[in-house]
Amino acid sequence: MDINSKKAEFIEQAHRVGKERLMLCSSGNISWRIDDDTALVSGTGSWLSRIEEENVAVCRISDGMRIDGPKPSMESTFHLGVLRERKDMNVVIHFQSEYATVVSCMKDKPTDFNVTAEIPCYPGREIPVVPYFRPGSPELAAAITKALENHDCALMSKHGQVVCGKDFDDAFQKAVFFEMACKIIVLAGKDNYLTLTGDEIHDLDVYVLGKTSK
């Protein structure tokens, strides 16, 4: 494995996430599984939009230990926890996009985010809401790891959002479409937007995603 080329790709993808304003300044972080037990993680306090090689930590997934590079993000515990539990996923993005973060701070959060077909197809028809825990805490890491065992996107109360994906495009797409849904919900206002029906979601499962009907 050429670690330098992996770092270069990681940096390119981190810049992409940062420039799309999925987070501001140092508010987000990203991780990428590069082999069975190794992940690259953005360093603590780094700004993804301008991250450099010196800001990329190399960590062991199995026990969370840093192998090389700077101190990883304070949220690395849940990044590595998700990668450990979800063998089918290789990228984790913690972000704080504008409208989704507004929703995370709402007193009465939506229970259904399926305002367009992209939501059940990408972030998922169910978006779990994780209670507030201090950023970087073991409690938050455990809650996020648990929430993403069977989901690809979670909303973190009074904090932000997290998605996991098979690759960078997959994770990025889930994050962008979840932000789009939250923007629709916020701008439409409470009780003034429609969501897909169960039958409409079933049609997407069968005719778009190709899932076998149960």
Image (tube, rainbow, N blue to C red):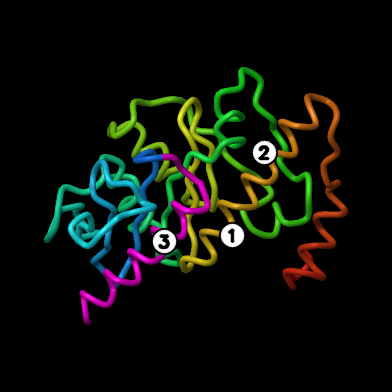
Position of residue 94 relative to residue 59, above or below, is: above
Residue position marked by numbered label 2 in the rendering = 182
What amino acid is found at the position of numbered circle 3 in the picture? Answer: Val
Left/right placement of residue 199 relative to residue 85 reads right
Q: Secondary structure at mark 1?
A: helix
Which residue is rendered at x = 47% and y = 56% of the image? 164
Q: Earlier in the sequence, mark 2 or mark 1?
A: 1
Mark positioned earlier in the residue sequence (3 or 1): 3
Provide residue 123's location: percent of width, then percent of height: 61, 53
Q: Which mark is residue 91?
A: 3
Describe the element under mark 3 as helix, strand or loop.
Answer: strand
Q: How packed is label 2: few (under 14 Cα within 10 Å), some, or many (20 or more)?
A: many
Q: CA distance from mark 3 to mark 1?
A: 12 Å
Per the image, label 2 sits on a secondary structure element best described as helix
Identity of the residue drawn at 61% across and 30% down: 103
Image position of 27 (left or right of 172): left
Q: Which residues are magenta?
A: 1-24
Q: Residue at 82% x, 70% y: name it.
A: 207
Amino acid type, label 1: Gln
Marks 3 and 1: which is nearer the front?
A: 1
The residue positioned farthest toward the left in the image shown: 68
The circle on residue 173 is 1
Q: Does 208 sit above or below residue 137?
A: below
